[in-house]
């Protein structure tokens, strides 16, 4: 299930990139490029459609990003946790630096 959500997230990202690139920051966007579509749907309908698709993709990306971690199986979590625990346990103990022998000079003010 996690793999499916990951793929849906990737597809939503790519579609969102495409939709954002279609839009024109000055307001023309898709409606300005296709004059015949403007006659059929009207300028407002085309830009409203692109804006609705943008919002739908953005919200779906947010939801998929928040739901995805809940579908990670317990074995995957345990595997990563046990690897980290093993690395910590097998780490070499830090060697302390011995104190210098002899007289230590006073700090200069």
Image (tube, rainbow, N blue to C red):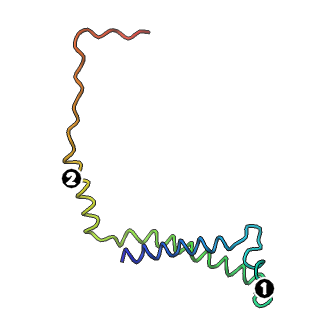
In the picture, which quadrant includes the N terminus? bottom left
Q: How crowded is mark 2: few (under 14 residues within 10 Å), some or many (20 or more)?
A: few
The residue beneath circle 1 is 38
Nearest the eye: 44 or 91: 91
In the picture, which quadrant includes the C terminus? top left
Residue at image position (63%, 74%) is 19
The residue beneath circle 2 is 86
Residue 106, horizontal then vertical, whole percent: 34, 9
Q: In which quarter of the image is residue 43?
A: bottom right
Above or below, 97 against 76 in this view is above
Q: In which quarter of the image is residue 98?
A: top left
Above or below, 25 against 38 in this view is above
Residue at image position (28%, 67%) is 76
Residue at image position (73%, 67%) is 25
Numbered disc 1: secondary structure: helix
Residue 5, horizontal then vertical, whole percent: 42, 75
Using the image, tell me which numbered label, if any, was put on residue 101.
none
Residue 4, horizontal then vertical, whole percent: 40, 78
């Amino acid at each position: 299930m996690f793999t499916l959500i990951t793929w849906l997230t990737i597809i939503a990202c790519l579609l969102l990139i495409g939709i954002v690139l279609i839009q024109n920051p000055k307001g023309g966007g898709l409606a300005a490029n296709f004059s015949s579509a403007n006659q059929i749907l009207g300028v407002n309908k085309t830009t409203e459609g692109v804006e609705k698709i943008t919002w739908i993709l953005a919200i779906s990306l947010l939801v998929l990003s928040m739901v995805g971690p809940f579908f990670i199986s317990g074995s995957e979590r345990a595997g990563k946790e046990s690897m980290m625990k093993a690395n910590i346990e097998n780490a070499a103990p830090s060697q302390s630096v011995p104190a210098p022998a002899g007289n230590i000079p006073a700090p200069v003010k």
